[in-house]
Amino acid sequence: MRIAAVGDVHLGEDSRGLLRPALEHLAGTADVLLLAGDLTRHGTCAEARVVADELTGLGVPIAAVLGNHDHHSDEAEGIAELLGEAGVVMLEGTSARFDLPDGSLGVAGVKGFGGGFAGKCASRFGEREMKAFVETTMASADALRSALASLDTDVVVALTHYAPIPGTLHGEPPEIHPFLGSYLLCEPIDEVGADLALHGHAHFGCEQGVTPGGVRVRNVAQPVIRKAYALYELNPARLAARR
């Protein structure tokens, strides 16, 4: 099973035609394309139309979550609607099933949020603003848990924008780790189970990491992978034997 993935492409109104050439022959290389958020530069519907045009008619199913940039102009709902009309399956606390040549793929997706990681994280205590910050991530983690639990497929992928582990943040200043992800996103990935976790957001991080439970995590932010998309091959039979 061949999974193409990328995040943080940050397309603007002046980006028309930049991504498309590298995706023209995607159908011969991958079975599915997963997008890990920050598809637009400033989160406008005008930019989303450019993204939609770049992704239309690629010949493979596409699923995506939005990122923080996609929320910047308070047009996230419109962006999701435009991309949905272009055939992209938009995920936010939801899941999707794709029946591919080598088996069934289930993708559970949320944008996620920040908060930090074990031992160095924000807590749900004190000011209402701090409680709201942490509660946003708690709600996102719960939504990811429900989405993962709804899947019964040969392969399961967790798709987020924010990072679920600190391991893929190496290269980013430690001071901003709480704004790049949260351990709360990792808990459902290990508890419910996933075969692969994909995220973006950390432009100066590293590609590879692993959860405490042994799930492979990949940071597919385009500045990290330095190409149009990364390609991951998963063998459903081999994964089933490990369970």
Image: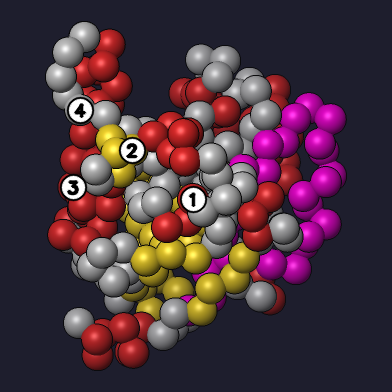
The residue tagged 2 is: 116
Residue 2 among those drawn in magenta: yes
Of badges 4 and 3, nearer the viewer stands 4
Residue at the image position 33 percent from the left and 89 percent from the top:
237
The residue tagged 1 is: 169
As measured in the structure, the alpha-carbon distance from the residue carrying label 2 to the one carrying label 1 is: 11 Å
The residue tagged 3 is: 146
**How far from the left and from the top, in percent, is residue 212?**
26, 64
Left/right of residue 75 with respect to residue 166 in the rendered view: right
The residue tagged 4 is: 123
* Mark closest to the chain's N terminus, 4 or 1: 4
* Mark closest to the chain's N terminus, 2 or 3: 2
Q: Nearer the viewer, residue 141 or 116?
A: 116
Tell me, yes or no, whether the two marked residues, 4 and 3, touch with CB atoms within 8 Å: no
Residue 72 among those drawn in magenta: no
Of badges 2 and 3, nearer the viewer stands 2
Left/right of residue 141 with respect to residue 7 in the rendered view: left
Stretch in magenta: 1-26
As measured in the structure, the alpha-carbon distance from the residue carrying label 4 to the one carrying label 3 is: 23 Å
